[in-house]
Image (cartoon, rainbow, N blue to C red):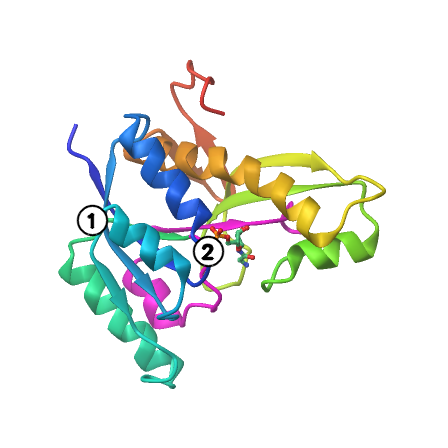
Amino acid sequence: MTPLRLGVLVSGQGTNLQALLDAIDRGEVCATVALVASNNPAAPALERAARHGVPCFVAARADLPDRAARHAAIAAALQQARVELVVLAGFNEVLVPAFVRAFAGRIINTHPSLLPAFGGGMHAVRDALAYGVKVSGCTIHFVTEEVDRGPIILQRCVEVRDDDTVESLHARIQAEEHRLLPHAVALIAAGRLRIEGRRVRIVNSFDTTLA
Ligand code: GAR
């Protein structure tokens, strides 16, 4: 099988990018990270990519303040790198519609809540904790023009403890994300997802060891 060419969009630490790179190295995901793109030149994620020998593209907010122009530059870099699947891994901007259309059905996102609860921003963990939910979790979903509303691929829940802080809850959620995101990419690379309306079915699902 030819490895699926990934473009990973990052703005921050890049622990999900790292999890993906590690899973690919272990042979669990038939994919290759062709490009890492960021809107933040100081993102530690870029150092992770560089350490792995992955090419990086930066469209900094300071250099390209217009969001549409910034996203067009990123889209062009992804196309140049012949990216087949775009993975949002802590990318802190809502993609402009032209970007979503350019990669229609070929963009996924990891979000640190059980969507459709607490979508629409980078504050999902804080919002879930403040709301007082007893379980939260993470969601891997396809990206559509409606923010955090695309068809859900995989979800995992984690308990919320009485003494949780935003940091402790986020750490527990991220431990799940780090397994779930590579698993979702592996399913896509293996052609095992069928989208029926809002529902995503996993076909030939005999091996659940990665879940
Ligand atoms: C992740 O927990 C991801 O779910 C979240 O940002 C974090 C990035 O961490 N994304 C969102 O909140 C998107 N709305 P990382 O840079 O260490 O992978």
Q: In the orientation shown, which residue stands out farthest toward the top?
A: 206
Quarter occupied by residue 75: bottom left
* Residue numbers of the magenta segment: 89-116
- Front residue of this view, candidates 200 and 112: 112
Q: Position of residue 102 (x, y in %)?
A: 28, 64
Q: Main secondary structure of the magenta part?
A: loop
Amino acid type indicated by mark 2 = Gln
Which residue is rendered at x = 33% and y = 59% of the image?
46
Q: Quadrant of residue 143?
A: bottom left
Coordinates of residue 35 in the picture (x, y in percent) = 23, 55
Decide if ligand 1 comes within 8 Å of the CB at mark 2.
yes
Label 1 crowd (10 A; few <14 / some 14-19 / many >=20)? few
- Secondary-structure class at tag 1: loop
Q: Amino acid at mark 1?
A: Gly
Percent of width and height locating residue 23: 35, 32
N-terminal-most mark, 2 or 1: 2
- Looking at the image, can residue 176 be seen? yes
Which quarter of the rendered picture does the N terminus lie within? top left
Picture residue at 80% right of the left edge, 39% below the top: 161
Tell me the crowding category of disc 2: few under 14, some 14 to 19, or many 20 or more residues within 10 angstroms, Cα based: some
The residue at the point 36 percent across, 31 percent down is 187
Q: Are marks 2 and 1 in contact (CB under 8 Å)?
A: no
Residue 159, compared with residue 115, is above or below; it is above
**Residue identifier under label 2:** 13
Q: Is residue 75 a member of the stretch shown in magenta?
A: no
* Above or below, 170 relative to 58: above
Q: Is residue 173 left or right of residue 129?
A: left
Q: Is residue 92 magenta?
A: yes
Instruction: Check disc 1 and report the residue beneath it.
Output: 53
Mark 2–mark 1 distance (CA, rounded to whole Å): 17 Å
* Res 88 quadrant in image: bottom left
